[in-house]
Image (cartoon, rainbow, N blue to C red):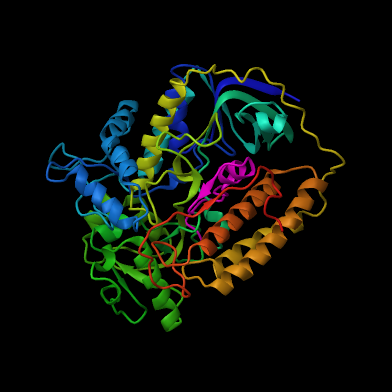
Amino acid sequence: MRTIDSTYLVIGSGLAGLVAALNLARSGQVVLVTKQQLAQSNSDWAQGGISCVMDPTDSLDAHVQDTLATGGGLSSEPIVRRIINDARAAIEELESYGVAFTRKTDSADYDLGQEAGHSARRILHAGDITGHAVIETLIKQVHRHPRIEILTHTMAIDLVTTGWLGRGGPNRCVGAYFLDSKRGEIFAVRAGHTVLATGGAGKIYLYTSNPDLATGDGIAMAWRAGVPIKNMEFVQFHPTCLYHPEAKSFLISEAVRGEGARLFNASGEAFMAGYDQRGELAPRDIVARAIDQEMKRRGDRCVYLDSTHRPLDFLTRRFPNIYATCLRLGIDMAKDPIPVVPAAHYLCGGVEADVDGTTQLDGLYVCGEAACTGMHGANRLASNSLLEALVCARNAAEAIQSDPRPAAADKLQIPDWRAGDAVPSDEAVVVEHNWKELRTCMWDYVGIVRTNKRLERAKRRVRNIRREIRQYYLDYIVTADVLELRNLAAVAELVIRCAEMRRESRGLHYTLDYLERLDEAAETRIVDQPGDAATLG
């Protein structure tokens, strides 16, 4: 089996992965692995922007308080303060790479947006395709860096640790196994420090704003390696995903409501004021639940987001991509309300990690949506996601480079991958069936509104699916589809288990069995022994 040696291993090519790779390349060789192309990530799909205090009438403390208020009592104030305090320097780094944020037409000042939960305009954006603009710029930097080796169409299988290798002493991550999806080759990367920046897990749900690659790979791998997982019950459902038979996972940005768009039901009634005094600018969990309730109450398939009070020139300038996409589907934002529905969007839980990405597994760092740092708590404030990914990736690179231990993985021999008696599959339909059943089960029973009975029903079904997947994984030669399904099912179980632990309604977790919020905020935490079969029965 081929083994690649590198100073650093970075898995994932979203904002966190690219920033970590660029910073780490200053002091050593980096292998940057992505399971598709570099540009394909949740970050690339991000529309709204990056929250950062830029206006002199705004303040860092106001941003902190907005974040804490949205976090439902579970955000860590020291973590929130550090990330927000580091925001300006992180933005300056992006601009040094060539990222151009939108400026006002009549001055050189930033054109700052405002989104739900923010008390001031503090959203830096690049039109309405901020994520794409940032990722495109960073990819150019990565491609031209001589110390970064890029592996595309490469799927991570599992982390390699000294404990798994049978070495004595403290357990440490020394790399990972990978599948070259195009050639079918399994190989290993051996590195002194590994960064997981693999993003979220929106594809555990039937309806999501996420691309197909959001399958929770890093979270599942870390869990199988015995790393603690936290707060997985807090799944953020974006209130306004475009509802159209020809549109797949297209988001209508939070910023549209930030610029005054209002929500109406099919009868033309504005309903948000009846759910929250902040109306359309209430936090996402409140707006998503309100839309869900309105649809169920009336039996409607969608609600409508109306921005027709805004002039055409404003809409085409502020939201060029959203406007063009809607128009291509026969919806003119300047004349027509946009049909929208809630969809799974962002995961506030993840691998337990500090603000510098450190985890309980020595040598393993986790950044971005795969990490649970304490920033978001029970609910994420709009546009804080890219900020956290950016700041924590920079911090992780700094922590790794200051690690006094040798960067090499002691040249530990990583064993050849054992396929055993596995054969090529002639029953791919099993994977497809389980994929659909899993996502439907999660949408029906572990969605915006939950109950004890729904969670118990979901857990039984998901565990049955996991047993089938495990047998399939052992019997047949691994493929990327099987690996993604394996990870999705693992993450689905983690979400269910955390949801069962939380006997209250807080933030994004809303249950009809426990409608009140407890006086004391506590985190849900799962610590299992290393191994894929830890919770199969």
Where residue 124 sits in the image (x, y, percent)? 27, 43
- Magenta stretch? 207-231
Using the image as rendered, state which of residue 103 and residue 87 is in the foreground: 87
Quadrant in the rendering for residue 389: top left
Residue 198 inside the magenta-drawn segment: no
> Who's the residue at 35% across and 71% down the image?
304
| Outermost residue, right side | 421
248 sits to left or right of 282? right
230 sits to left or right of 102? right
Using the image as rendered, state which of residue 416 and residue 2 is in the foreground: 416
> Who's the residue at 46% across and 32% down the image?
18
On the question of residue 66 being in view, the answer is yes
> Who's the residue at 12% across and 45% down the image?
57
Where residue 14 sits in the image (x, y, percent)? 47, 38
Which image quarter holds the C terminus? bottom right
Where residue 301 sits in the image (x, y, percent)? 46, 75
On the question of residue 113 being in view, the answer is no
Using the image as rendered, state which of residue 359 and residue 425 is in the foreground: 359
Q: Main secondary structure of the magenta part?
A: loop
